[in-house]
Image (spheres, rainbow, N blue to C red):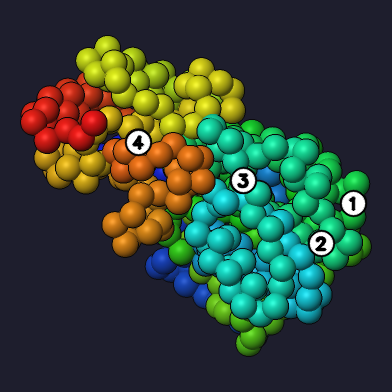
Amino acid sequence: MQTPVYLDYNATTPLDERVLEAMMPYLQGKFGNPSSSAHWFGWQAVAAVELARKRVAECIGATDPQEIIFTSGATESVNLALRGVADIAGSGHIISVATEHKAVLDTLSYLQRKGFSVTLLAVDEYGLIDMTELESAFRSDTLLVSVMHANNETGTINDIASIGAVCRERGVLFHTDATQSVGKYPFNVLDMNVDFASFTAHKMYGSKGSGVLYLRKCFPRIAIEPLLMGGGQEFGLRSGTHNVAGIVGLQKALELCTSAMSEESLKCRDLRDGLYTRLLQEIPSIELNGVPINDPRHMPGTLNISFPGVLSSLMMSGINDVAMSAASACGTSDGSYSHVLRAMNVGDVRGESAIRISVGRYTTNDEINYAAGQLVAQYQSLADVRVA
């Protein structure tokens, strides 16, 4: 086993060699611009983009390849969906959840400053919303509901099929941030009543800088304004020269994840459960954040645990050869603890001692055993500075 050990797969994943192999031709010989329609180099590039569009659509159950809009990543896709709908409407009400990723929450704050009304639903101790509260939150001017599929910090999985059905009954658009679930957990836009879905390549062993917005075409009410103006690429919704290599890599990454999903989910669940069991045996007072570890609503590769009385920064400062995190890689940097755990009302002591560990395709049992040993040793070494 080599160190450092990487256990932060929810932040980003290593680039799969098979994905890199698929990308390489479009970084070298096939370097054409898909918008160059007068020669062979452009034709090669546009053919690759359109094949990727078709196959990505198939992987998520979309009925039309033109429902796939390629972007620079999930953050842009979220902005395009939320701001795109709002710009068309001009005013109105949006419903979301207090535990959403900052890409959603910060976009909603921006829209509030523009005059839109936003309702953020509370969550319970597991990070789940109350469906009755959701139904009560709808207003006559509600435009959109945005609820993430799987939480990036706790691994809690929302029942987005039921949420989407409630939205559909009311004629309200439904967006889900599926960044942590696509490629790792069954996801079908038709079965889940989704109108918009955002995700990105680098969470599923693709490259950074390539993402997708799924936009349902068969719902006539859907119309969005683009964020970027220029060449009119992506059906006029996302101008800018295509990242052909990144798009091809996203396609390949998603196909690989889809074909191996059952096997990899089982592997990740076993590794995560093994780590949790070992830590619980050595430190019985640790606390799990999110739904119970054996609950099907818990993402297989995610473990968020609190080490009572010890700041997460202190725990991690003494373990330099294991990559973990205290919260989302895109979360707060002001020293306060995760807004997700705060919304779950876990309390300051528990929130400030939380560490997120996430495993993936390349994680081994040896790495899990090593990480467990390092965490136990570090916790024991801090016995004199623990806070009750």
Mark linked to residue 142:
2
The residue singled out by tag 4 in the image is 350
- Residue beneath disc 1: 170
Gap in angstroms between the C-alphas marked 4 and 1: 39 Å
Res. 44 visible in picture: no
Q: Given the image, on which type of amino acid does mark 1 rest?
A: Arg
Of marks 2 and 3, the one in the foreground: 3
> Where residue 105 sits: x, y (%)?
56, 61
Q: Is tag 2's residue or tag 3's residue first in the polypeptide sequence?
A: 3
Residue drawn at (48%, 40%) of the image: 345
**Closer to the camera in the image, 345 or 209:** 345
Using residue 357 as the reference point, say whether residue 129 is left or right of it. right
Q: Is residue 385 visible?
A: yes
Callout 4 amino acid: Arg
Q: Position of residue 348 (x, y in %)?
A: 36, 42
| Amino acid type, mark 3 | Ala
Q: Earlier in the sequence, mark 4 or mark 3?
A: 3
Disc 3 residue crowd, few under 14, some 14–19, many 20+, Cα 10 Å: some
Judging from the image, what secondary structure is the residue with disc 1 in?
helix
Distance from label 4 to label 2 (Cα)? Answer: 36 Å
